[in-house]
Structures are given as structure tokens and as C-alpha cells.
Amino acid sequence: MLKGFTVPRSPLGTAALTPPPPWHYAGDVLAVEFWNEPDVSADILPRGVRLDTLCWGRSVAIFADCQFTANGDEYLDPARYQCREFIVLLDATWQGSRIAWCPYAYADNDAAILRGWIQGYPTKFGVVHQTRTFAAASPASAPLANASRFSGCVSAHGQLLAEARVILRERADHLVGLLDRPIVARRYFPRLCAGMHDIPAVDELVRCSIDKFLISNLWIGEGELTFPEAQGEELDMLGPIKVGRGFRFSFSCSFTDCTILADLSAERMICRPKKGR
């Protein structure tokens, strides 16, 4: 019998790209809040999701340097289970509830990309970096202190997609306006069968459940953010028309579940016009 939570399924199951949940993460985050043109960002939302009119066009760009494990000490395999990721979250609503919608995401290894797809994140391959800080003081280690500077960038296929800078100003106890909404994403898996390319096998809006979310060493400051135009990408269309605060913090969290909010494939079948005789 073949085993494994994901492909490739194999006799032992150890060849699978990622183990079954629960999935645990820890890492460092650099983030910048920004505002984009609402008429443009509204076009990227699926049916039923709307921009939050109380935070019109507000979004957050997040650079994360992560370490992962499940229940098998996967963190002892750092080449496979350390990853760097970049995601964009738009302030939106679903049936009147405030949510964060993820239109774009990038990660630097295959296991992270597949975990993203399973959760509904539209993850693509990208190279992500951010300034690090270390316990040993050095000119090469950015300190967590007033006026300290951090930078983050993401590129794909040799093209720069996003670049951020943050100048730390003050330490904070709570995140306000950042990762304080449930994240909603879209699980979408198309069919290859002829005549069924527009009828996906899976098309679900899901709310990602984040458990045991902890924040430490939170600093807030001034942010800078740019999305250069790049061939084959559309991230630049969400380009900032205004940039707000920058954030730098460490985090840990776990993922065990997601909630299906809507089955869009079922809605598509109901709305699909019947062929004439």
C-alpha cells in the first residue's frame, strides 16, 4: 500500500514532499503596511470577497525567514525545512466579517510551496531575503534598537519583485493592524481533461486556522516599499500609493486545520448554462 500525505506517495511514505499536519513554524518577520489603488486591488478578489471600506486599499507585505517541523523532528533537516517566504495580505471582508485576503505568495523551496497550495496560498517559487540579527554583537548584525535598519527583498526568475526597508523606532507589546484578522485564501486545482479546463477539481474559499500564535521582540518603525514591474508577474499592479509603518518581530505558530467558507466549484456547476440539444 502506498503511503504519504502528499505526492509522491511511496511504500514508506517518506518520499512525500511534506508530512501530515500539525505543522509548526518559527521565524523572523519583516513587514510593511501600504495602500494601493482600490479600483485595481478589487479586481483581484474572488466572488463574495470585498475590500474593507473602513481600511480602503490597505495591505501588508510580509517577508518571513522560517523553520518548520511536524511531528518527526523535521527541523533537524534544515535544507528541506527551512524556508523564506513572502506574502501580500489585503484588508477585506467576507459576509461582513473582517478578513485578510492573500492574492500573491512566494517561497524558496518545493515543500513550502506545496504546503501553501494545500492551505490555499497561491505560492510561486521566489528567492526571498531579509536582514538578520544575531545574539553576538557585530557591525554585521542589525540590533533590535531605535534607528536600526532592516531590509527585505524577493525576486523570481532573475527579476526583482519587491523591496522593503524598515527603520526601527520603538518596541511594542501588541500587533495592531497586522496579522490580527483571519486569513482567507483560495484552494484551486484545475483539471487537464479536454473540455473541462474551466471546471476545476477543487475551488474553495478557506479560512486558514492559525493556532498558538506567539509574537516576541516586536518593533515598529518607518517603512519603505516598492514593487518594480516584472515580466510575467502582476504584483506591481498592487504597487503602493502610500506606505505606512514597518514591523520587525519573531513569531511561532501552528497549522492543523482550515475551514471551507464556500465551494466555488459547486457554485460554478449550478450557474453553468446547459448545452442545447
Image (cartoon, rainbow, N blue to C red):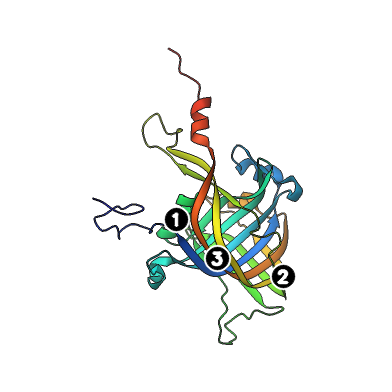
Measured from the top left, where is residue 257 in percent x and y? 49, 52
Q: Give the spatial CA distance, label 3 vs label 1.
A: 15 Å
Say above or below: 202 vs 98: above
- Say which residue appears at 41% left-offset and 31% top-offset: 196
Which residue is label 3 attached to? 64
Measured from the top left, where is residue 16 in percent x and y? 33, 57
- Tell me, yes or no, whether the two marked residues, 2 and 3, touch with CB atoms within 8 Å: no
Give whichever of discs 1 and 2 has the lower sequence position.
1
Which residue is label 1 attached to? 115
**SS category of the residue bearing label 1:** helix
Residue 104 - label: none
Direction from residue 259 to residue 191 in the image, left or right: left
Residue 221 - label: 2
- Say which residue appears at 58% left-offset and 82% top-offset: 141
Direction from residue 215 to residue 77 in the image, left or right: left
**SS category of the residue bearing label 2:** strand
Residue 122 visible in the snapshot: no
Q: Amino acid at mark 1?
A: Arg
Measured from the top left, where is residue 153 in percent x and y? 57, 65
| Most foreground residue, 255 or 151 | 255
Q: Amino acid at mark 2?
A: Gly
Estimate how packed mark 1 is, as few (under 14), some (14 to 19) or many (20 or more) residues with alpha carbons within 10 Å: some
Q: Quadrant of the C terminus?
A: top left
Quarter-of-image position of residue 149: bottom right
- Say which residue appears at 63% left-offset and 59% top-offset: 179
Camera-nearest label, 1 or 2: 1
| Most foreground residue, 2 or 86 | 2
